Amino acid sequence: MKPNKNTAFESRAIISSPIGAVEVLQIGEAITGIRIISSLPSSARASKITPLLRIVTTQLKEYFSGTRFDFEFPIELRGTDFQKKVWRATQKIPHAELRSYSEIAKKIRRPKAVRAVGQALGKNPVLLVVPCHRVIGSQGKLTGFAAGIGNKEWLLDFEGAPLSQSSTS
């Protein structure tokens, strides 16, 4: 993401985690991106670690140590209205619980939009905070994850989410 005239600034932090490097992007006073990266992009530049980035990196480290289940920092979801609905619904999935793409589609009152839900989750800009790894196929199978199926499986195992569990709550 490049700053533009509508953004106050962009800062980034990178932390190591059991599933690889995690890049956190901040624009203005909110986090706009959290993603797993295989290596530092060549376009990355050193950035000032802001107070918000310190909070986020602390909370991510707590999550990966198993002492934090929810995140408490401002995020700004950037996407279409449909994507934002999907991401907000996904954000409400409790730690260690699973939902199917179909359940998310029903939750946002678009029961036939199962594939569109999957596409929206594939563009999730803030992994872990919008826990798209907790969304599985209707038959209980692991399907797509931007950071790779192996990482999805690791995260679900780490959280203690049984793959046979899917609730319509």
Image: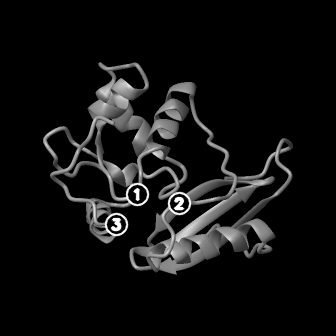
Marks 2/1: CA–CA distance:
8 Å
Sequence-earlier tag: 3 or 1: 1
Q: Are marks 3 and 1 in contact (CB under 8 Å)?
A: yes
Tell me where residue 79 appears, x and y as whole percent: 58, 35
Q: Quadrant of residue 146?
A: bottom left
- Say what amino acid the circle numbered 3 marks: Glu
> Which residue is pictured at 36% across the width and 33% down the height?
104
Q: Are marks 2 and 1 in contact (CB under 8 Å)?
A: yes
> Which residue is pictured at 34% across the width and 23% down the height?
113
On residue 53, the disc is none
Query: With 127 as the anchor, is 151 left or right in this view?
Result: left
Which residue lies under the disc numbered 2? Answer: 70
Query: With 4 as the anchor, is 54 left or right in this view?
Result: left
Q: Nearer the viewer, residue 41 or 47?
A: 47
Vertical comparison of 130 with 157: above or below: above
Tell me where residue 50 appears, x and y as whole percent: 79, 70
Circle 2 Cα neighbour tier, 10 Å, few/some/many (<14 / 14–19 / ≥20): some
Tell me where residue 167 appears, x and y as whole percent: 26, 41
- The colour style of the image is one colour
Circle 3 Cα neighbour tier, 10 Å, few/some/many (<14 / 14–19 / ≥20): some
Marks 3/2: CA–CA distance:
12 Å
On residue 159, the disc is 3
Give the secondary structure at mark 3: helix
